[in-house]
Amino acid sequence: MAARNVSKSWRSAVRKVLAFWPLLLPLFIFLPGLNGFPYPSLNAPYSDLVISHYPNALYIKRALSEWGVVPLWSPTILSGYPFAANPLSGLWYPLGWVALVFPLPLGFNLMAMAHLLLGGVGLYRLLRLEGLTHVAALFGALTLESLPKLFAHYGAGHLTLVYAVSWTPWLLVAHVSSFSNSTGRYLRGFAPPGLILALIFLADPRWMPYAGALWLFFTFAHRHLSQKERTGENSPFSNLQLPISNIQYLISNLILSAFLAAPLALPLLEYTWFSTRSSLAVEDIFAHSLPLARLLGLVFPDFGGHHEWMLYPGGAVLVLLLLALLADHRRKQVRFWAIIFVLSALYALGSNLPLLQHLARIPGFDLLRVPARSLFLMGLAGAVLASFGLDALLSGRITKIRAVHLGLTGLSAFCVLFVLSVRLWTGHWVDQFLWGGAAIFLGSLWVMILLMGGLPRQIWLVGLFGMAILDWGAVNASVLSFRPPAHQSSELALVGRYLADQAGPFRVYSPSYSLPQDVAARHGLQLADGVDPLQLTAYAEFMDVATGVPRDGYSVTLPSFAEGDPSTDNAAYRPVPEMLGLLNVGYVVAAYELPVEGLVLQEKFEELWIYENTQALPRAWIQPDDTDIGSGVTPAVIEEWQSHKITIQAQGPGLLVLSEIAYPGWGVRVDGEREEVETPFGLLRGVMLEAGKQEVVFYFRPTTVYLGLGCFAIGVVLLVLRNRFQRPRPR
């Protein structure tokens, strides 16, 4: 009897899992390039995953295998930076480490697929808790999982942003499970919202303000009580005032989130304070604001378009969204998500709405740089509204049939007239307008067929899901393509091997980004230039003079590229070999000639020139007087170099200069005695030595990291105590 019950339970579990098989369909786009790097298109020159995430992952693997430590400092770009404080390092997001178990980029793609599926399942669960049917909730989950904006950002290489956005539905599920008695035994109290919010921050802090704002708005506007209330007989929005206990709930979750996110949050705050990010101008904060004309992208897909401005949810989604707005079904729930939809679109306009520019004066507002990121919330709200519309349609709660017919006819007519107008104006058919118009027209027609009883429901649903998946697939395929790991020009491979064969240590500088960060990482090369949103202000100011390239406001690249073309933008500027020599820059790689005294041409590979810097100083040296660059220096021997510790044998007296960037947390011991770290040239690390041979050890012990880990331990204790002493809610 027991065996029969187990078998029955197992078969029931399998049937439940199989009911989610449509959620696997959006992931098929990954299969042809599962072991490739994502790019926006086959011809796109850059991907953030290749520029940042891949080199960072290689560095973590190297640190673990060679030194047996988790690296807190990185020498790979910008002459060194605090790795533990950089959100792009992927150091603090636990699920991100799973990707390192697999060969790269396979691991990245597998984790991206897993997170897309995670987001879909999370939204499905949330919609089921809202009282929607399985089919309606499944369509909403599929909409979010297939969202073209998600695929466009992954094509741009924004791996951690995909991680963070995928947790957003679970943040709301966690809120519901904290209050509802009908969430089921598997989800009742499964995790507090503070834990999910911390995971979002550790995955990508850029998304945390948006997700946190949604959670707070959801909490104040949406009380989850009984199933009877969620199905509409009583409104779950009937009380917009939170009782004192719920205020305490919000505060306790925010405190828990702060403790759990502290390992990244505290070092990041310190790093931001010393970085160029601390002085963003208004135009920098509102970069990539959505142009007003781009709002048409809601109806017409932008094939191969810019990832920040991608907002197309799908033709069928728009039709069902319109149904939700017209139906007398879950009105206050629909109103809530409609407000989220509209506010997200308005905020995405950024600088194109003059009133929003005043928000830039609010402290901490720079965390919301690139307002078009709010379009993720718009996509989430659209998925939920489409689910409500489908639920109303399938449950027969569409009472205003005439209004629905007029609305769908009007939407279809607008698309047809717009497409014809563009045809008359340009003299040819535009693919994106044809596609969007056809998707809207077919979706509207399909809904009218069901309303008139023209097809059995099962066949109608197959057609709806099929149209939607075809629509999403075509758009997603235009913004995401894959290239194999070996995709690298022979020219870059030759340059990398040539530099790796030279005697070191030394750094490489390129005014034309001719030695990409992934190539440098593969060959174990260290760069004085780099691409990263966070750059030390002191280093950027030094490089303004050393490179000869002026900065015009905030830039994620160093040096900056005024016109966005690295191959030519800086051809007129001349670097200063003596100042680059201070950074141990032994070689300069450029896409053009550099007739500069002190730079000697060594090799030329097709269109790349490799110069040796004859003014380069060793990585460590003794200098009697730090006022003259390289005057009377004596090389010092680096016996051991690790990410967190550098051991040097030096002969005093004099100032020992280590060509590494000074930063809080670096200390020094001379023959075992702790000494004060000097900052020669206002940038590097140094220590005064007495006469004689001495052992000098520079070590990195960042206070903010250790304090953050202590806070994290407190957060774990609070989480355990919560689960241990939380009173069970009545069934």
Image: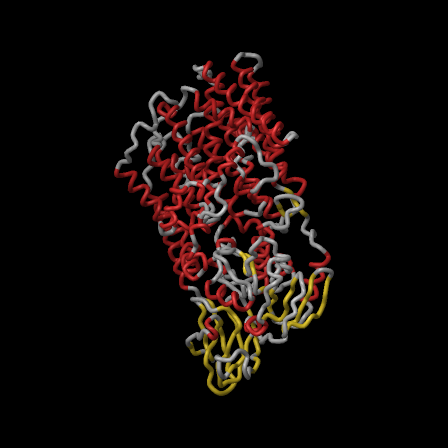
Q: Is residue 402 left or right of residue 20?
A: left
Q: Is residue 355 above or below residue 387?
A: below
Residue 419 vs residue 465, the one in the foreground: 419
- Residue at the outermost left position: 244
Q: Position of residue 341 (x, y in %)?
A: 44, 33
**Above or below for 519 versus 618:** above
* Camera sees residue 500: no
Instruction: Work out whether residue 569 or residue 149 is closer to the camera in this orientation and state it.
Output: 569
Quadrant position of residue 230: top left
Give the image's coloring scheme.
secondary structure
**Residue 695, above or below 518:** below
Determine the residue positioned at 51% across, 80% down: 628
Residue at x 45% of width, y 73% of height: 679
Q: Residue 527, percent across and down?
A: 58, 64
| Residue at (50, 79) in percent of width and height | 656
Where does the image place residue 685, in percent across and percent down from the top left? 48, 73
Name of the residue lying farthest toward the top: 453
Q: Nearer the viewer, residue 66 or 590?
A: 590
Q: Position of residue 73 (x, y in %)?
A: 50, 63
Quadrant of the snapshot with the C terminus: top left
Query: Number of labelled discs?
Result: 0
575 to the left or right of 335: right
| Snapshot quadrant of residue 388 | top left
Q: Is residue 353 visible?
A: yes
Question: 254 or 467, which lies in front?
Answer: 467
Q: Who's the residue at 45% across and 45% down the image? A: 207
